[in-house]
Amino acid sequence: MGVPLQQVLIQTVNGIVTGMILALVASGLTLIFGIMDVVNFAHGELFMLGAYVGVLTMAATGNFWLALIAATIAIALLGAVIYLTTLRPLLGRDPLTTILATFGISLVLQNYALWQFGPVARKIAEPITGHFTLFYLQYPWYRVVIALISAAIIGGLWLFLKFGTWGIWIRATTQDRVMAQAMGIPVPSVLTTVFAIGAAMAGASGVLFGPLTAVDSSMGVDWILKVFIVVVVGGMGSLAGSIAAALMISLLEAYASLWVSPAQAVIVSFVVLILTLLFRPTGLFAATGR
Amino acid sequence: MSRRPSLVYWTGFAVILALLIVAPLVLPEFWRRFVTEILIWGLLAMSSDILIGYTGMVSFGQSAFFGLGMYGAAAALLSVAPPNLWLALVYGLAGAAAAAGFVAYFSTRLRDIYFAITTLIFSQIFYVIIFTWTAVTGGENGLTFDRPALAVPGLFSIRFTATTLHWFVLAMVAGSYLALRRITQSPFGMVLQSIRENEARTRAIGYPVERYKIVAVMLSGLFAGLAGVLYALQNEFAAPDFVFFLVSGEAVIFNVIGGVGTLVGPIVGAAFFLLLREGLSRFFTEFYLIPLGAIFVAMVIFMPQGLLGFMRRWLNQ
């Protein structure tokens, strides 16, 4: 089947844009998992609630960037509350119990959103309405901007982990929680902060992605599945692996949708997952084994 | 096991079985249906308990087996004339077994949370296929069919009434319970429990752990498929909603509420969950999952052994 080169290039751009958002959500999940062994099933719901906070702030102020900041802060606070009330009591128990607890939380949050905001999907208006010409298409600048903002947030996280005092504390806690405590690092606050940062990243991506899709209470479920695939393929706990896997899977899905409908293009990511499990069950980009 | 507790056990079993046999004759229509549903969901929960409670693997993939059971039954009832109950059962179990074989082959390579996540994603694969393959599965609308007659070739053939359907489900669930009890107490079941307790040591003793896990997932899939067939028979439809992973999540919730690692626990959990849902939806309408989710989280934190474990500790005091 002949597909014009132009379409392939357009899908490459599309794939990179969704890939960057996916990477942003996945790196929040990976951060939380890598540092505290918590699989956050409610991550997709934090993404969805972030989008809703964006919708509400947009309705009140009309300013997209304000909405982005409000959602980031609100979801960070929500993350901290979730951590303190339900996950801290589970500290030291089997990581499997954290899946169960966060699954319960995701049910609560999802149904809360349905109850509060109703089944009708909301829209977030694009803050940048300009277009540029990409072959025969008028391509919205906003999509490019999202990819750049996501990259900037992920880059900021990397710099923070590398050079920030709290970032260094976070990495020390990852390596050895007991030793970190002994060195005077406030480990409980570090863990709460990590969860809040991961949640904030989900919230921010919710607002960023909002204009590209409809905001409704079930968007979190679709995303959590994608993100789970990404983290398994990328090697769970590996930040770089998650980003690479997010880009790879989004690109493959974008190319697949040249031939089949987007609903069926999802199957491509399942195939990638199966192949990964067959040949490298520890994840494509994981440095260490499980 | 000494003789006396087993006598107490069988007396208890007989009493409960007798109560369940009498139930449809005395209960009003709504509650009769309700008890039948509890039995079916209890069977699904038990199937999930083979993995969660006995092998130590949390499966979020039960909905795939349950759903394939439903669609298998639907396929048999729609394609073969005249519709045959036993053929529906065979098709449903074959569908569930095929799905379970596929899932087991890949997901048992991983442990703990990775197993949980991959089973979740695999059940989603089946969901997407069933949801998008409209020509065969009816897509979003699912398939509807008529309930076949309860027939034994050459002996009798009667139409299902609500009461006989309840008895049929009860017979299947009680039979499955006894089979599962036998399996979990067999040497095979002991190996599964030793995998739960210490996988590395079980492997060191020389048991092929991967093979045991694959068999465990397949067994679990078969019983989940049976639950799916029964549910399809009761409701006369198969729908993609039941392949969605939230159904697997509910099976996990039944287990945690009732108490993992006991076969009775999941049924108690299912009954408790459905009663709670019934009660809560009077006040919260369709948003009953808000309070129910909160109760579930509280139970994970404060009552990790579930209702049964909690009661046992309370009785022992």
Image (cartoon, helix red, strand yellow):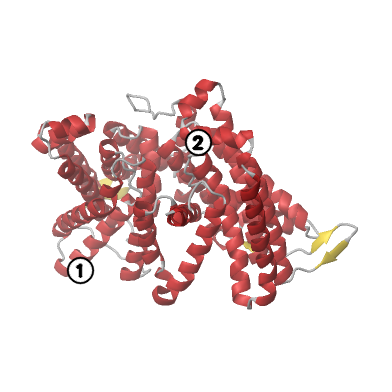
Give whichever of B298, B122 is nearer the camera.
Answer: B298
Residue at mark 2 shares a chain with residue at mark 1 = no
Please report the residue visible at 62 percent of the width from the left and 55 percent of the height from the top: B228
A275 lies above or below B147: above
The answer to whether residue B281 is left or right of residue A101 is: right
Image position, residue A36 (x, y; %): 27, 39
The answer to whether residue B287 is left or right of residue B221 is: left
Please report the residue visible at 33 percent of the width from the left and 24 percent of the height from the top: A288
Q: Nearer the viewer, mark 2 or mark 1?
A: 2
Image position, residue B46 (x, y; %): 57, 51
Please name the residue that numbered disc 1 is placed on.
A59
A61 lies above or below B71: below
Give whichever of A68, B178 is nearer the camera.
Answer: B178
Please report the residue visible at 46 percent of the width from the left and 38 percent of the height from the top: B115
Q: Is residue B99 visible?
A: no
| Quarter of the image that includes the C terminus of chain A | top left
- Host chain of mark 1: A
Q: Is residue B171 visible?
A: yes
Give whichever of A106, A140 is nearer the camera.
Answer: A106
**What's under tag 1, amino acid-wise?**
Ala
Please name the residue that numbered disc 2 is placed on.
B107
